[in-house]
Amino acid sequence: MPGPKDLDPSSSPRALLGAELRHAREATGLSQEELGQSLFVSGSFIGQLEAGTRRVQPDMASKLDDILGTNGFFERNCKAVNRSKYPDHFAEAAEAEAIAGAIREYAPLLIPGLLQTEAYARAVFRVYRPTAKEDVIDGLVAARLERARLLDDPTDPLLWAVLDEAVLRRKVGSAAVMAEVLHRVAALIREHRIIVQVLPFGAGAHASMTGAFKLMDFEDAPTLAFVEGPSTGHLEDDPATVARHQLTHDLLKGTALSPQESLALIESVAQDYEHGEEHP
């Protein structure tokens, strides 16, 4: 069959590529499950590709072209789609995050990226990359602030974050940097734009002692989990694994301070930073 025309990578390339995959699959009469079997992946994974929540990787793209008879279309265009301003370990998660209807996460050490200020993000990247040139740091900061524009919409996506108390107490940059970022978080809470709960030190052991994770819900695709570590991370779509992370987030919410108590603590710590008081 004649292949679809090449995509303009400047206009929602992942969504366009997914739409073209759905069109090509339906034209051959294959179901998502049938196409998935040919690629040794699940039908739900094919659905995620078509919905734009997962990337078409180069090795899979060439197989898609062979199966669907698309004359190299997917192999050519996946290269453009996979270009990203984000680090490789986070690129796919950042792109999925941008189209999620709800985001739930647990942050054990840092203010979540969507809530960071420019000064806070710059301090984080400078510590991560102490010898990087300033223009490299500038690019990383700009990409992070662009991500944060997701919250410019007054209602979508829903963001529900559980922050370990260490996130508030560990000084990143300076006291002024901490005061600014905590006031930003508090302002978003007071504007009813986000839900934040603080997991206090007094809670002791909890359900996510091993680290950070993020859950992303979509209107037309299954929930994804992103598990993160130092300069590493991976998306999980296995239903049992995702369900476990969902339960973990629920357990953390049950252990954490209420949203009202959390707001009071965040604002109190921000004021302490403004007054130059140090925290244990």
Image (cartoon, grey):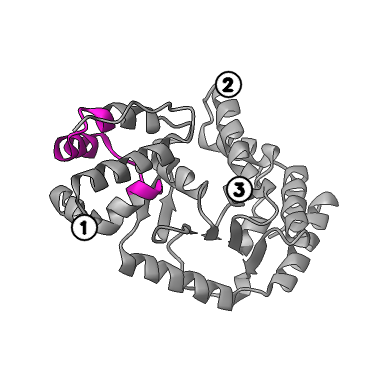
Quadrant position of the C terminus in the picture: bottom right
Mark 3 is on which residue type? Leu
Mark 2 is on which residue type? Asp
**On the image, numbered disc 2 is attached to which residue?**
135
Q: Nearer the viewer, residue 220 or 259?
A: 220
Q: Nearer the viewer, residue 41 or 20?
A: 20
Residue 215 pos. (x, y %):
47, 60
Residue 267 pos. (x, y %):
79, 60
Mark 2 vs mark 3, CA separation in Å: 21 Å
**On the image, numbered disc 1 is attached to which residue?**
33
Position of 53 compared to 194: left or right? left
Mark 1 is on which residue type? Glu
Q: Is residue 64 magenta?
A: yes
Q: Residues within 10 Å of mark 1 (few under 14, many from 20)?
A: some
Mark 3 vs mark 1, CA separation in Å: 35 Å
Q: Is residue 278 visible?
A: no
- Ranked by sequence position, the earlier of labels 2 and 1 is 1
Magenta-tinted stretch: 49-75
Position of 192 compared to 55: left or right? right
**On the image, numbered disc 3 is attached to which residue?**
114
Q: Secondary structure at mark 1?
A: helix
Residue 61, placed above or below residue 111: above
Name the residue: 19% across, 34% down.
65
Name the residue: 31% across, 46% down.
22
The kind of secondary structure the magenta stretch mainly shows is: helix
